[in-house]
Each structure stands twice: as structure tokens, then as C-alpha cells.
Amino acid sequence: MQSQHHFSLRVPESGKADTASFSIGIPLSQGLCYVHQPLQCKRNDNQLVKCAFTPLAWWPDHSVKWLLLEGHTPVAGINESQFWVEPKQTAAIKVNQEHVASLESESTISLTTCNWACQLSKTTLFDGYFMLAGKRWTFSFNSQFTGEFSEYHSSLTDWHVEPKYCDQPDGSPAFIHLALYYELSAGRPDLAPIKLQVKLGFEPALGLARITTTITNTNPAEHNGGTWDLGDPRSVFIDNMSLSISSEQAYAAIQVSPDTANVSINLDGHLWQRASGGSRWDSPNHVNHARELSIHDPATHFIVDGITQQAPARPEPAALLTSQNVQLSVSPDRFWQNFPTSLAAEPGKISWSMFKAEPGLSVELQPGEQKTHSAIIQAKSDTVAKAAIANATISADWLTATGVFPRLSAHLLNDPLQSLISEGLDGPSSFFAKREAIDEYGWRHFGDLYADHETDGYTGDTLFTSHYNNQYDPLLGFLKQWLISGDQRWRELADDLARHIIDIDIYHTELDKPEYNQGLFWHTDHYLPAETATHRTYSRHHKGNAYQDHAGGGGPGGQHCYTTGLQLYYFLTGCQAAQQAVLGLTDWITTVYEGDDTLFGLLLSYKNRHRIDLKNISTGTYPLDRGTANYVMALLDSFEITNDLQYLQQVSYIIRHTVSPDDDIAETRNLDNVENCWFYTVFLQAVCRYLDIQSVVGKNQDYYYAVACLVHYAHWMADNEYPYLEKPDILEYPNQTWSAQDLRKVAVLSIAATYTSEDNALRFRAKAAEIKHYVVNAISGSNEKHYTRILALLMQNYGIDTIECATSPTVVETAGKFPVSIQRDKGWQGYVFHVIKRLSVKREWQQLQKRVPALRRKLS
């Protein structure tokens, strides 16, 4: 057995299952495994684990950096076992892998292996059958829309199947991933189609399948006056959207919770979740476009054969069909949390409604919005092992040893701020308790965080609702906490938030302004309730002049772009939607700063050349602020996913056109103007991240240039920085958010200390320690310490000094490693040439229509 394990598994109620199914992405040390090498997964009782391996990221030497494991293993002894991956020491067993046979006709697609089959209709919306536990199960899809999509034409636009293998004796795939893509067209030229994506993941040997559906309204919003309210003319209104599974002469039942008995259905049964079951079910969160509550009846309805049955307010149900000693169950994920949902059953048929609206209260899917639902389908029989889904936890020691995430270590648990962060799990102000405070449940809201800091000073009688929309990347914070602590509740928060960000917070359209498309929406506007803007920042019901410099309108912007949590989530789960979100957000923020390569975009960039938050096309320089930092971080995240050096080269270009080791900081940067310049530290943190990555890829001129810039600014910080709240008079709102932001200075100084002489390192670390001491005392003694924004900032920025304090500084000599006189591009000449080179009248016209909605409407 090797000395260090990679991960462990836990199975709740293990006595009810024989086999555990699991999926986890794990990091690997550079040079440990290569794609061409046969791999194996083992546990410390020396059992081999049946496992399929998918590389997700690579080191510069082309060894595997992140590896997705999908496997299953006996439950016996699993909670005491440790697991690891290694190259096979002996030659791989020759197994003739059976490919998935496919046969496509005009009307159907048929897929088969020796122990599995599936047939799909090409002419109807998600209709066909699949085989599990040796039995055929028929499925069909039903939808009821109100308004323009009440009648639609559906088409299967694409599909693909991906088998994965575990060297099974018969050569059959252990996992079969099937993806289907549909378009639902209303037949109006001014309405883009609804997109429906259905993904099915089968484990035939265990009788398991997971189904995931994603419905997307690809239309652009009107956003008149920069407001984004419910009631948009291109919204899609859904009364019902359901999946049915049937088998002739099968008995039907509903189980409302895992610890309750099945309730048999003779005629029909219906479990309908209309609200969260919480005490604040009537929260303003749940108003519709008319500012009226969209819930008339909050009760959980469970009616069987016409008789009302008792049911918990928050059920965790399953619908079941039993036929010929085979029982099939459908168990929706987060059933009550994603209301309105339902399960229905009748002899021979069960149905799961992802959306089930009350009469007259249709669910409104806004333009650019999507929603994903998933469920576990399991078939049990005498010939199929009883399976359970295991929770995997990565070894914190192994994570540190791999070096994939510098300065992420279990030693963070010893940081003095850890106790404050841990309160996010327990107590009256935990993230779970905050969900209850404003009923942050329902299909649109669940997973998001309550922006309770916006209530500071609020004295009204009504419930103040505000949505956080991942500001300062709490998704990254949750995942870091899970990795270092192993506490599954952090992973639960991360799973829920990741799904929410991907679905609701990102603007899923290509038909709006290029600087909006696929962008991330801001949090609710400061000091204002969400009203009917839900997760779209600005509402027409918001009062003007809510605070100094109040804008009161707009769309996605580069100052609010957070991709690192999504990147890490992809590596840990293999979630392709997270991967696509990172790459899409990177494309979006690139457009924000570099333009859309059209003449109109060029004119707009010239018009905005003096805006302090955008690139100056005349000088080619970028603002020293958090937007540029977000741009850099997104490029770095995309590089780590793709290994495409163009992303890294663009980061180098941005750094050279933002800061210089020759900057006269005191005279030109105006960093004493804290309100307008505090976020220079965010950019320096992005430079630190770049150095971590570039040092592994190769130390070139760009690397040494960035080191020189970092150390240059660290010298100024050591001489001039202080805790922000020591000078409250120069701050508009002197609250503890400023103390949390001070941690950025601690991080920059602590990392800069590792690149310089011992004397400089002592000075940098002394300043960092001084500021850290202030932060710990200030926040620990504050009644603001439980606020979401405070906790998000702590999770994102704390502990760098704790990790680096024992690191010996190493002088990085930068003299002579890059040109003394840095020649910056002037910017506009090259951009003009680039635009002219790509000039297309058709594209210019298309982009103009996107930018001018009135023109688009007139032409439609």
C-alpha cells in the first residue's frame, strides 16, 4: 500500500446497499500519471476498484493534473477504507471493449450493448425506451406552456453517446453517457427557440441512471432603461414540464421520504410541492411580475386515490414502479427546494414534474435564463446488486502534496479567522439559516446566498430580500473549506451554488449586446430589495439615488466576473456545464475589454476611451482595478482547463499594459484615494496567481517582469498601507467589509515576500502581520462578522500569511531578464487594422441589430 491516499468514501445507511457508486475529480502530482499509461484504483484492503478514468487537465509535461474517476466498489468496509490511483505495475488485461452499437433511421436512434439498450424518437420530444435490470422501461416527455410557446415545433438538433470502461470481463461499458439536444420553436421570427438538453448517465451493471434536464430561454431581454424585471415580453411561461416512465402491468407507489413506507397507488397518486414548507414561504422572493405572491397554497399536497394523505412539509420522495420482481424508482434531487415540483403515479406509470405550477400562476423563465433539474433512476432486482451513491472526500494532505492549488492546505484550519468562517455552517447566522430568513428556495432562488449585509441600517417592517450572485466567489470559498475540512456541508453549499450560478446568474443568450451576452449578472443593487428584478440587479421599482454615485441601471459588467470557483468545481466533478461556463465567461469578459471586432464596436471603444473602468483604446492601457483582475483570472482559469498558451500570453500582455516596475506609484497611481483605487490589490492578487502558473510553465521575460512589478508595488505597500478603517473619515460607508478587504494586502505582501531578499521579506511580512492582527480583532469583535459579504471575502482571501510564514524567501533576480524600456502597444492602430481585416457587412449588420433593440424589433 502506498504511503498517502488520495480520497475516501462514505456511504450513509450502508447496510441497505451492497455496492457504492461514486464520481470524483482528484488532483495528481506532476509526472505521476500519463494518458497512455493504464491506471488502476485501489483501496487499502488491497481490493481493486472498478473505475473509469477521464483526464480533465494536464501539467506542462503532459502528465495528468486532474483526473475524473467514475466507479463502484463493495460497501463492506468502505467507510474505513482509503483509496488511491496509480499506474498499473503489470501489463493491462486484454479486454475487447464493446462499442455502443448505433442504428439511426428517419424516425429513431437505437443504441445497444450486451447488457443495455436505448431507443429514441427523432420526431417527438424525448420519447423512447431504455433497458435497466433486464427490463424495458418506456419514457415520454410532456410540457404545457402558456402564451407564445403554447404550440411549438420540436426538433432533435444533435446527440452523442460516450461509453466509459472498467475492464469488465464481457467488455461492456461500465458507464454510458448520452446527451440529447432539442429546439422548441414558436414559429415567430422575433422569438428565438427554447433549448432543451437532456443528459442520461447509465451504469447498467448496477441498474443506475441519472437524468439531467436543462431548459434555456435563449431570447434577449428588453431591459429598457437598464432594468431587468419579470414580465419581459420574451419570457417563457411554463405550467408543467414532466418526464413519465411506464411499464405495462406494473404496480405504482410513492415514498414521501427515505424512512417511510411506500404508499401503494390503485387509481392515482400525486405529491405536489407548491412552496418550501418553511415559516417564511410568503417571502417577497416569490412575487411575480405584477408584484403579487406567486404561491396561493403553501401546503404540500399528497393525495392518493382521492384521499389526502399525511406528508412532511419537506419531503424527499421517490416514485416507484414494480413489475416482474423488478422495482424502478425515480428520486428527484432537491425536490422541495426547487418547488413547484411534483411526483405522480398510476398503475403502470410514474411521472416527475420538474415544473408544476398552480393554476393561473405559471412559472416565468426569463430571457437568457435556464433551469436544470436532475433525478436518480434505479432498478433493483435479484440479479442486480443494491447500490448506493457514495460521498467522496479528497485527502487534504494529498491535495497539498500535488501542488495543484498553491497555498491551499489543512494548515488553514489553524488560521485565527477560521473560527469565524466555520460559523457559516452552524448557528443562527449560518448559510443554511440565512436560506430560511428570506425563504431562499424555489427553482430560481435555491442555491443563491442571502445578501444580508445590504440590510445594514434597514428599519422597515417588511422582509428585505437581496441576492448575492457569487460576488467575491463564495463558490471557491465553499470548495476550499470542503477540501481542507472534509465537512460535507460545505460541498452541499457548493453544489447548490454552482448550479444556481450556471443556470440563473449567467445571461444565456447570443442575441443581445456583445458586452452582455453570456455575462454574469450583478448582485441585487446596493441597499435596495430585489423587487421583481429577481437575479437581474436593477428593477424599475427601485428608487433613484439610493446611495452616492447610484447608477440605477445596466447589465453584466467586467467588474463582476468570478470564474475560479466554477473552474475548481469542474475539476472536482467533471461537470461540463461548469467548464463551459468558465470558457463562456472568459469570452464575454474579453469582449468587454477588447471589443467585438466590428466598426461599431471600435467607435464605442473610442467613445469610452476615458472611462476609468475600461481599456483605453488610445493608449492601449488597462485600468488598475478589479475588472482587469477578473479578466486576468478568467484567462488563467481557461488556460488551466485547456492548456492553450494564448490565454497565458494574453495575461502577460495585460500585465505589461497595466503596471510597470518603473511606475511612480506615489505620483501617478493616486492609491490614497481609497474609494476609487482600493481594488489595485485585487489586480496584484491576479498577478500572484499568474506567477504561480507561469513558474510551472516556464520562467520567461513575462514572468520576471511580473515579479518586478509585484515586488515594486509591495515596497510601496510596506511603506504606505494601513488598515482602511484607521481612516474612516475618507470612506463613504466605513464598515467591516473594509477590514475583510484588508486581507488582500496581507495576501499580496505575504506572497511578494517569497520573491525578494530576506530583509525585504521581513519588512513585507511585518506589515502583513500588522494588518492581519487588526483584521482579526476588528471582525471578531464586530456584529457584522456573520454577513455574507464578510464571510465570502474571508473565505477567498484568508490564510496566505499562515501558509507562507514558514516559507524561506528566495530572491528572484529580475535585472536584465526583460527589456529595460518596456514598449507598450499604442492599442488603437492595431485594433483598427484588426477590425478592417475582419470586416464583414453581414456581421456588422447583425451586431448593430443586437445593440439597437428598436431596430431589431422593427425588422422582426
Image: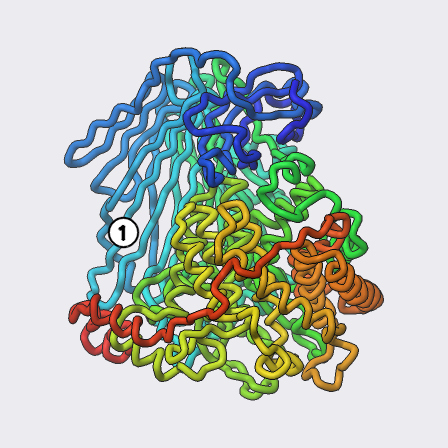
| Residue 546 % position (x, y) | 59, 85
| Residue 125 % position (x, y) | 28, 44
- Which residue is identified by label 1? 183
Residue 404 shown left or right of residue 70 in the figure: right
Q: Quadrant of residue 615?
A: bottom left
Q: Residue at x 64, y 80 (%)?
A: 666
Give the vertical position of 665 relative to 19 (above or below): below
Q: Report the number of discs.
A: 1
Q: Between 526 and 242, which is closer to the camera in this rendering?
A: 526
Q: Between 419 and 122, which is closer to the camera in this rendering?
A: 419
Q: Quadrant of the N terminus?
A: top right
- Kindly give the residue lying farthest to the front in the view shown: 816
| Residue 375 % position (x, y) | 48, 39
Secondary-structure class at tag 1: strand
Q: Quadrant of the C terminus?
A: bottom left
Residue 795 shown left or right of residue 419 in the figure: left
* Res. 230 visible in picture: no
Q: Residue at x 40, y 56 (%)?
A: 584
The amino acid type of the residue labelled 1 equals: Glu
Q: Between 315 and 198, which is closer to the camera in this rendering?
A: 198
Question: Crowdedness of circle 1 by 10 Å Cα count: few (<14), some, many (20+)?
Answer: many
Give the vertical position of 638 relative to 294 (above or below): above
Q: Quadrant of residue 430?
A: bottom right
Q: Residue at x 51, y 69 (%)?
A: 627
* Res. 635 visible in picture: yes
Give the vertical position of 672 relative to 229 (above or below): below
| Residue 810 % position (x, y) | 68, 51
Q: How is the image coloured?
A: rainbow
Q: Residue at x 75, y 56 (%)?
A: 758
